[in-house]
Image: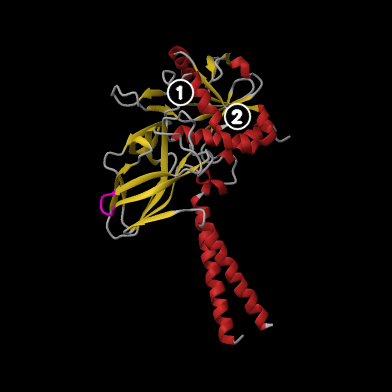
């Protein structure tokens, strides 16, 4: 190979490396939260005085209270099945978190509590939660029961818009609550938190550094 | 010596190019005039789901601003442009009456937790392997037919919301 060819090949290789490096760094830029080594990074919020006893109906039609899940860590999310964007996104994140926890997920019970009991009946919830994760439990109840649990968790929810259409949306708090085995709130996760961050935070609670 | 160095370099070049092209192979892209529509996707839905959201990245390579003003699909009774916004911890979904602006020379992401196409009263559940046809209507660039790739509930999450 001539000196000229060698120079050309070297140049091409250098250009290719620059392109690859550029693409890789661009991809990393797209996901800055994944590079944030801090386990309590963006989207993880310190404990708040929320939670408390509740009585609701699970997606199998069984009446349950908070005592049913005593001794387990809870991941609690309030939403509604008609919700097109946020609820599937957050429930997918909860499902991913459970998978990331592996065997440790046996200590964690994810709960999806509807703020729309009128439409989210037991069969609708059953169909919905099993789509996301086998461990996910859907909870509904009477309007009073839902209002009570929402109040305990300081969850805001309201029907959006004034029309009488059956296709209404709800404005709602979009936090995921991590509750301890004693029922106390340990952390809140905002929509900015990733499944990786949630799994890291939960693991730290399950296995505190000695 | 020199020859093997050159061969190694050209091998490296080829490998680098494979990386570049392979990383793009999973995405699908559409174009209409100077607008690029990158990787339109949606999530698979539970059998009785009434709603779904469509996501994609829109890039305007033109020197004039454009706007996504409407969407149509035979897969749902209604398809609207919406935006999820968090205000004081409360999520609100607002219909984008004036469409979604795509300024000249910039990209706009339709992604979980932000701009999205909201589809209600689905004619059938969205299942993997069965792409959802969708027509995008732009103010300047006109109409383009795309297909939303149906991904598992975990699909698309690697990018995370909030960008």
Q: Quadrant of residue B19?
A: bottom right
| Residues under numbered marks 2 and 1 in contact, where contact means CB atoms less than 8 Å apart | no
Residue A208 appears in the picture as rendered: no
Q: How many residues crowd mark 2 within 10 Å: few (<14), some (14–19), many (20+)?
A: few
In this figure, which residue is indicated by the disc labeled 2?
A: A134
Q: Give me the chain letter of mark 2.
A: A
Decide which of B105, A133 is in the foreground and name it: A133
Does the rendering let one see residue A150? Answer: yes
- Rendered residue at 54%/64% (across/down): A20
Residue A89 in the image, given as x and y percentages of width and height: 48, 36
Q: Which quadrant: the C terminus of chain A?
A: top right
What residue range appears in magenta? B138-142
> How far across and how far down the image is residue A206, in percent?
68, 31
Q: Which mark is residue A155?
A: 1
Label 1 sits on a secondary structure element that is loop
For numbered disc 2, what is the local secondary structure? loop
Q: Chain of mark 1?
A: A
In space, the residues marked 2 and 1 are separated at their CA atoms by 25 Å
Rendered residue at 42%/21% (across/down): A119
Majority secondary structure of magenta residues: loop
Query: Is residue B36 placed above or below A111 in the rendered structure?
Result: below
Are the residues under marks 2 and 1 on the same chain? yes
The verdict on residue A53 being magenta is: no
Comes first in the chain, label 2 or label 1: 2
């Amino acid at each position: 190979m001539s000196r000229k060819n060698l120079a050309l090949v070297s140049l091409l290789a250098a250009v290719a490396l620059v392109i690859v490096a550029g693409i890789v760094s661009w991809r990393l830029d797209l996901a800055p939260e994944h590079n944030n080594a801090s386990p309590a990074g963006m989207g993880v919020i310190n404990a708040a005085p929320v939670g408390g006893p509740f009585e609701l109906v699970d997606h199998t039609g069984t009446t349950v209270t908070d005592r049913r899940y005593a001794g387990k860590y809870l991941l609690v999310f309030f939403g509604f099945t008609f919700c097109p964007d946020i609820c599937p996104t957050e429930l997918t994140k909860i499902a991913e978190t459970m998978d990331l926890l592996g065997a440790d997920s046996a200590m964690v019970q994810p709960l999806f509590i509807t703020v729309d009991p009128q439409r989210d009946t037991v069969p609708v919830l059953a169909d919905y939660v099993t789509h996301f994760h086998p461990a996910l439990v859907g909870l509904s109840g009477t309007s009073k029961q839902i209002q009570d649990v929402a109040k305990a968790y300081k969850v805001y929810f309201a029907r959006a818009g004034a029309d009488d259409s059956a296709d209404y949306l709800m404005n709602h708090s979009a936090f995921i609550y991590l509750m301890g085995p004693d029922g106390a709130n340990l952390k809140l996760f905002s929509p900015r938190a990733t499944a990786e961050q949630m799994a890291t935070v939960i693991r730290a609670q399950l296995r505190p550094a000695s | 010596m020199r020859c093997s160095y050159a061969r190694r370099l050209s091998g490296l070049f080829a490998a680098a190019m494979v990386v570049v092209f392979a990383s793009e192979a999973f995405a699908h892209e559409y174009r209409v005039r100077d607008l690029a529509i990158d990787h339109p996707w949606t999530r698979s839905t539970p059998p009785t789901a009434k709603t779904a959201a469509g996501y994609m990245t829109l890039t305007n390579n033109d020197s004039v601003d454009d706007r996504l003003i409407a969407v149509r699909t035979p897969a749902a009774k209604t398809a609207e442009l919406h935006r999820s916004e968090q205000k004081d911890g409360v999520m609100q979904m607002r219909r984008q009456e004036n469409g979604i602006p795509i300024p000249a020379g910039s990209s706009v992401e339709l992604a979980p937790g932000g701009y999205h196409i909201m589809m209600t009263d689905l004619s059938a559940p969205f299942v993997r392997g069965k792409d959802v046809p969708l027509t995008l209507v732009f103010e300047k660039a006109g109409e383009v037919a795309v297909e939303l790739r149906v991904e598992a509930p975990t699909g698309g999450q690697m990018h995370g919301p909030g960008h």
